[in-house]
Image: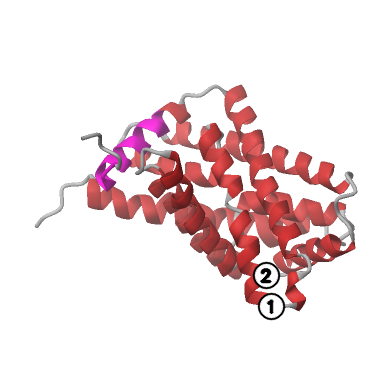
Amino acid sequence: MEKRFLAPSEVVKSIIAASETKANLSAARLLLLGIMAGIYIGFGGFAYIVVMQTLGNIDMGLMKFLGASVFPVGLMLVVFSGSELFTGNNLMTLALMDGKISVKGLLRNWVLVYLGNLAGSLVLAFMICRSNLVDQNVLNMVLGIGATKTSLSFKTAFIRGVLCNILVVLSVWVSSEPQEVVSRIFSIWFPIMLFIISGYEHSVANMFFLPLAKYAGLAISWGDIWVSNLIPVTLGNIVGGGIIIPAVYYTAHILPLES
């Protein structure tokens, strides 16, 4: 009988092997695939805004759920197109722990992919803002999101970043288990929906939300965007997705533990 699901220990080995490949991709390929991933996450982010724009006056919980139901399409596009997403690539620390890649190779991937994600997000935010798609209802939602995200304390943004990327890398993880597309779609949808509806912070999504708010007229500087959100959220994402989950499951599934 054909095997349709990988065991957790097999997923760890699969991610390690994929991380070796990622660490050796050319700079041009990493930047290009990173740009596309930033655009895809932005597509999901803007759909999230459009769905929620008028529902807040009806029911806040329903508004968050319906917005969260469309955002995961962004990660689906990233995974199925083979693009490079910084937060998902935080799982590459598994290969570092296993001695398959170097710190230099890991950081090279993260930096180039992060820059690519940022470039793609900025381009999409600019294009949407200049496309007459930001009408009054959408504008109110965009400005509200931007103001809320830049008003967080460093500690709050950091902790929300940790919680967010625990779910994002678990989404990437569990989507690697099934061998057919429909199961992989649901494996991505549920964890991503959960992080959105819970209000956690994702650095790449915020690369789209915050510039969009700035382009739309929110009185924030690029310094506000970085210091008040992107820096603490990025650090939190690394801790959640690059340390906590990899350390736990590498220990549980690869290292020989005493019985």
Q: Main secondary structure of the magenta part?
A: helix
Position of residue 89 relative to residue 23, above or below, is below
Q: Nearer the viewer, residue 16 or 5?
A: 5
Assess whether mark 2 and mark 1 are in contact (beta carbons under 8 angstroms): yes
What residue occupies the far left of the structure in this picture?
259
Quadrant of res 142: bottom right
Q: In which quadrant of the rendered image does the C terminus lie?
A: bottom left
What secondary structure is marked by label 1?
Answer: loop
Q: Is residue 101 visible?
A: no
What residue occupies the far front of the structure in this picture?
1
Colouring used for the render: secondary structure
The three-letter code of the residue at mark 1 reads Asp
Read off the residue under disc 1.
59
Q: Is residue 90 left or right of residue 229?
A: left
Q: Residue at x 79, y 65 (%)?
A: 141
- Point out residue 22 in the picture as x, y percentages from the top left corner: 47, 30
Q: Is residue 144 visible?
A: yes
Q: Is residue 224 left or right of residue 113?
A: right
Q: Nearer the viewer, residue 86 or 171?
A: 171
14 part of magenta stretch: yes
Read off the residue under disc 2.
63
191 part of magenta stretch: no
Q: Residue at x 40, y 47 (%)?
A: 173
Q: In which quadrant of the rendered image does the N terminus lie?
A: top left
